[in-house]
Image (cartoon, rainbow, N blue to C red):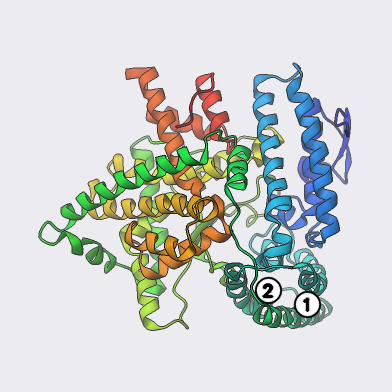
Amino acid sequence: MRSYNLRFLLVCAAVFGSAPCSPVRAATPLEALAQAHYQAEWAFNPVTATQTGIHAGDGRLNDVSLAGFAARDTRLHHERDSLHALLAGKTLSPRERDEAETLDGEIARILITDERIQPQLHDPDLYVSSLTSALYSLIERDFAPLDRRMDSAIARERAMPAMLDQARTQLTTIPAEFRDIAREDLAGSFAFVTHDIHAAFRDVDDPKRQQDLAEASRNVVAALHRFQDYLGSVKPLGSFVLGRDTMQAMLAADLVDLPVEQIVKAGRAQLARDRADFLQAEKQVDPAAPDQALAVVRQDHPAADRLIATAQAQLDGLQQFVMAHALVTLPSHTLPRVIETPPFGRALITAAMDWPGALERSTRPGAQIAFYNVTPPDPSSPAAEQREMLEDLNRPLLLNITVHEAMPGHFVQSLYLHHNPGWSLIRKLASSYATTEGWAHYSEQMMVEEGLRDHDPKLHLMQLQDALLRDCRLLAAFGMHAQGMSLADATAMMRTQCFQSGAAAAKEARRGTEDPEYYAYTLGKLMILHLRDDERRAQGAAFSLERFHDALLGAGLMPMRIIRREMTGHDAPLL
């Protein structure tokens, strides 16, 4: 077993702000282990390192070789052995124990992906998304001078043809759903490489650099065409289904000790409650013809060219509402910038928050910007499909999405992340799926409960439609991966049980094939609601919603089991 009881560790300057790499004293064995773990992960995955704010590997691509994955997994098993030894001892403080358990779960989740799910063998989108993320992470924020980031982009582009060629030799059985997602994302990457990258660096007045970028980009485009031809000719084989044991293991990695069957039962009960509330809200919107209420609300949508401006205006109003009603303490009054989702990321994304890396230390003006991405209709799609997509982003629903993604959802989570410099490395980099998405989903319901838009029944209807969507995600995830539900069955459930449009139902069900953990939205919300109920009972008249929210966010994106323990002082059932 490898020992991580180090007293000194070479730590990159990008993390601690010193000059080139220098010995930094690790105060505890857990800190030394965590530093060694993250340093090794950033070396293996420099694209993630760039996104995190670690820039020593900005000119390199991720190691996607099978040998690289094997070496990484051997290391991770040694790290878990060392963590278990620490947890078995008596030297950790309660807070350190919480963080050690969190890191152990995060390492377990990586191992589940590498050793059980194995996207390196079955999912071509692993390689497509790695390529586009490698470039986008260099241009989306101004963390370094433009010419330096351009040099990194050239270096990464020069390595991309070999990576795509390697992908063709490593991919074995590719389920049809994974092939289709990759082909859609790949289609959006051509314009990104040929136009967007060059537009980002057009102000660099250096003919040699411009020539090098143009040549590297041509080679990347040629490699993308080869990969596109490969995906067009490959015969889909295999199944996306993970099985109950893997789904249970993923829950355990997020420190959720509930059996799959109990979570599915809770999800079905929540679906029944939300459907009943939805039908009641329909009557409030249109008492004369409640079955037409959803269609009426869907007609109230901005034009495609007004989506971004509409979402930005909603942000301003939501911030004022949060502050006026003392719902949560905002560490900063800045707001994210609303932009269109990059074309290469639209296959599965309707809207998403993209905040600066947890360890980004650059003080350049553009380094700390957060982006709220919204996906407009594809202008090349049939007119009817574009119209349906705009109806899916009607104003009340877009407001609910803005609550989720920005205020007080994910963006406020990022504010707490960046305004707690005393957090440990583990806490800064924690990323529980259920906590992250659970809070944002919980925020939607909480804001309606607190009177957003004067209890407008149209907003309530759309908040409930989104809640139904997340209920169906939970049931589709466990249904498809653990209970024999087909993709067609999941699509039909999305449409008939959760009132999603045909386009949204197909997109959402397909997402569950590649993102099985999207059960986390409803599961996380239910765990937060259960904790809130427990705290209200325990505190009685002294309970404060603002203090509850501040404490929850103040714990970071740790698993809900840890947040409950730190807020209450003990463990208790999560549901």
Apparent side of residue 380 relative to residue 396 in the rendered image (left or right): right
Q: Earlier in the sequence, mark 2 or mark 1?
A: 2
Q: Which mark is residue 121?
A: none
Q: Amino acid at mark 2?
A: Ile
Image quarter for residue 145? bottom right
In x, y percent, where is residue 242? 61, 54
Identify which residue is drawn at 68% across, 24% down.
97
Closer-to-camera residue (54/202): 54
Identify which residue is drawn at 62% across, 79% down.
191
Image quarter for residue 270? top left
Measured in 3D between alpha carbons, the distance from the residue under mark 2 to the one under mark 1, in whole angstroms, is 9 Å
Q: Can you see residue 319?
A: yes
> Looking at the image, which residue sits at the far front?
484
Vertical arrangement, residue 448 with respect to residue 566, above or below: below
Identify which residue is drawn at 74% across, 73% down.
204
Q: Secondary structure at mark 2?
A: helix
Q: Which mark is residue 213?
A: 1
Apparent side of residue 337 relative to residue 468 in the rendered image (left or right): right
In x, y percent, where is residue 394? 33, 64
Quadrant where the C terminus is found in the figure: top left
Q: Which residue is mark 2?
A: 197
In x, y percent, where is residue 238? 64, 66
Question: Contact (CB < 8 A) between labels 2 and 1?
Answer: yes
Image quarter for residue 57? bottom right
Q: Can you see residue 321?
A: no
Apparent side of residue 172 relative to residue 414 in the rendered image (left or right): right
Q: Amino acid at mark 1?
A: Leu
